[in-house]
Image: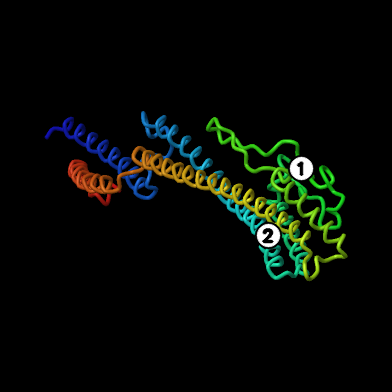
Amino acid sequence: MNGALTLRFTAQAQLDIRRMTRELSDLQRQVASGAKANDLRGLGGAASQVLNASTMRAAADARASSLNQLEARFGVQAAALSQAATANQNLAGAIRDAISANDGRGVATELNLAFISATAAMNETWNGQPMFAGERQSGAPIRINSLEALETATGNQLFDEAERPQILDLGAGSPIRLADKASELSTEMYDAMRELHLMIEGMGGEVGQPIDGAVTEQLIAFAERFEAVSSSFTNAEGRAGQLQSRFTAERTRQVERSNLLLKEIGERADADIAMVSVRISSLLVQYEASAKTFGDLSKLSLLDYI
């Protein structure tokens, strides 16, 4: 082989070795990182698709996170409404039990317990924000804390809430009313509690035993009112549960969407480790052959070359 030809083959072998060295380095990086490229520029024409998919996935994840918070909120909200419903139902039951036993001495105590439980429910909060105070972000919507204070408290003396209810728009084109205000939920309850309390106070602090016939009729009417109030709270609890289920389903949909987008991103941006391994094996064979050729032509061993 003449000198010029030997030089040409030597130069070509050297170029091949450098090319394969760079490719091997990149393939080893892919194995280590799991990514086809260091950045979007390395993905070529797929870069814009990966970027778009990443943006959509971030939006889906953010929406799923918000929906998860709403699920939790409506769980607490439903529990508060259930507590108010139970308080009124228990009071109605206690009144009917008193009528059946012809002994009303425990009605005043049951009324006070129902007032405390229902008021605590109306003052329930989520992340420090009152749930039933409308748009207002702080402070309890019920101003009073005793039946004595309820005697003269009505309207703004009783309720401390924003003019408008709290509205949430998740971007679906249909704003959602998160909850009714305390005044909308509990005005009838507090009116009935006030009237029953004043009646008991007028009787000396307790209904007594036996129960007078006229008082029995009044107590029956109160029991019916508290049962109706309990039903209204139960209906509100049902609406909260429906919204919670709706948000659960939507969150699941967003999580599935995020997973699909992640798969799409992976197909375009993630390295196929099996294929990379095959390519590395192939390159190593070529590398050794080229290095041997270069070594033979330049009278150098592979060890000397490295």
Q: Position of residue 225 (x, y in %)?
A: 70, 52
Name the mark nearer the viewer: 1 or 2. Answer: 2
Quadrant of the frame with the N terminus: top left
Name the residue located 73 percent from the left edge and 55 percent from the top edge. Answer: 222
Q: Mark 2: which amino acid?
A: Ala
Q: Nearer the viewer, residue 223 or 214?
A: 214
Q: Nearer the viewer, residue 95 or 126?
A: 95
* Label 2 secondary element: helix
* Label 1 secondary element: loop
Which of the 4 image quarters holds residue 286?
A: top left
15, above or below 302, in the image: above
Question: Would you say the residues marked 1 and 2 are in contact, meaning their CB atoms lie under 8 Å apart?
Answer: no
Q: CA distance from mark 1 to mark 2?
A: 28 Å
Left or right relative to 96: residue 57: left
Q: Position of residue 289 (x, y in %)?
A: 18, 45
Disc 1: which residue: 161
Q: Position of residue 184 (x, y in %)?
A: 71, 43
Q: Nearer the viewer, residue 273 or 68?
A: 68
92, above or below 39, in the image: below
Disc 2: which residue: 92
Q: Mark 1: which amino acid?
A: Glu
Name the residue located 20 percent from the left edge and 47 percent from the top edge. Answer: 285
